[in-house]
Image (tube, rainbow, N blue to C red):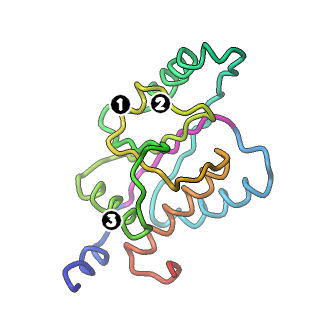
């Protein structure tokens, strides 16, 4: 137990985090929540959100083609050395403590930028999924993409609180 705690109390360098999301948040209560956690995250990480416009799918037969077009837009926003975590239904589910440990491991690799990708309601292009270093799923349940963004920034904040051994987690 002691050696595990020492991992959490180690000094964590400021990490650059980029969240790439398709679509804008329209609901003010969700915007307020995201903004609040971005403000709380400021002492721990530099967080940037890049919103890309999703392409409207008018014909279900074109879904894969449109996902690939969206994928090109997403991939153009990712630097070569970035560590990429995609949010995917088939991704791995982690507890908050495991997520904190994952962020700690990534930081210790010397990664300069951690990128999270939230796709459209139709998912992610295979090219984006293939670029991922890690695939994360929040739940077996389906959430609105705007909720996923709020949950993500809250969990990133919680992870840093866990890693710093600061009050908030429970």
Q: Name the residue under label 1.
A: 130
**Residue under the image location 42 percent in, 30 percent down:** 128
Q: How far apart, in angstroms, are the residues tagged by discs 1 and 2?
A: 15 Å
On-image quarter of the N terminus = bottom left
Q: Is residue 17 magenta?
A: yes
Magenta-drawn stretch, dominant element (helix, strand or loop): strand
Disc with the residue nearer the chain's start (1 vs 2): 2
Of badges 2 and 3, nearer the viewer stands 3
Q: Nearer the viewer, residue 160 or 3?
A: 3
Label drawn at residue 77: 2
Identify whether 30 is placed above or below 170: above
Of badges 1 and 2, nearer the viewer stands 1
Q: Name the residue under label 3.
A: 101
Q: Nearer the viewer, residue 35 or 127?
A: 127
**Residue under the image location 69 percent in, 61 percent down:** 33
Disc with the residue nearer the chain's start (3 vs 1): 3
In the image, which residues are magenta? Answer: 14-23
Q: Quadrant of residue 11?
A: bottom left
Of badges 3 and 1, nearer the viewer stands 1
Is 65 on the left or on the right of 159, as rendered?
Answer: right
Q: Where is residue 118 in the image (x, y as percent from the top left)?
A: 54, 41
Q: Where is residue 90 in the image (x, y as percent from the top left)?
A: 44, 43
- For disc 1, the neighbor class at 10 Å (few under 14, some 14 to 19, many from 20) is few
Is 64 on the left or on the right of 145, as rendered?
Answer: left
Identify whether 37 is placed above or below 79: below
Q: How far apart, in angstroms, are the residues tagged by discs 2 and 3?
A: 26 Å
Q: Position of residue 147 (x, y in %)?
A: 66, 52
Identify whether 97 is placed above or below 52: below
């Amino acid at each position: 137990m002691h050696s595990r705690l020492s991992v959490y109390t180690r000094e964590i360098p400021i990490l650059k985090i980029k969240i790439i999301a398709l679509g804008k948040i329209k609901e003010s209560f969700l915007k307020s929540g995201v903004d609040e956690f971005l403000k709380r995250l400021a002492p721990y990480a530099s967080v940037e959100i890049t919103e890309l416009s999703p392409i409207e799918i008018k014909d279900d037969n074109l879904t894969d083609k449109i996902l690939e077009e969206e994928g090109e837009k997403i991939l153009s926003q990712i630097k070569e050395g970035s560590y990429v975590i995609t949010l995917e239904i088939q991704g791995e589910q982690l507890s908050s403590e495991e997520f904190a440990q994952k962020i700690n491991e990534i930081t210790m690799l010397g990664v300069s930028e951690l990128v999270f990708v939230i796709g459209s309601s139709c998912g992610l292009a295979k090219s984006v999924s293939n670029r991922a270093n890690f695939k994360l799923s929040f739940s077996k349940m389906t959430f609105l993409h705007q909720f996923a963004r709020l949950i993500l920034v809250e969990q990133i904040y919680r992870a840093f609180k866990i890693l710093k051994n600061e009050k908030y987690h429970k």
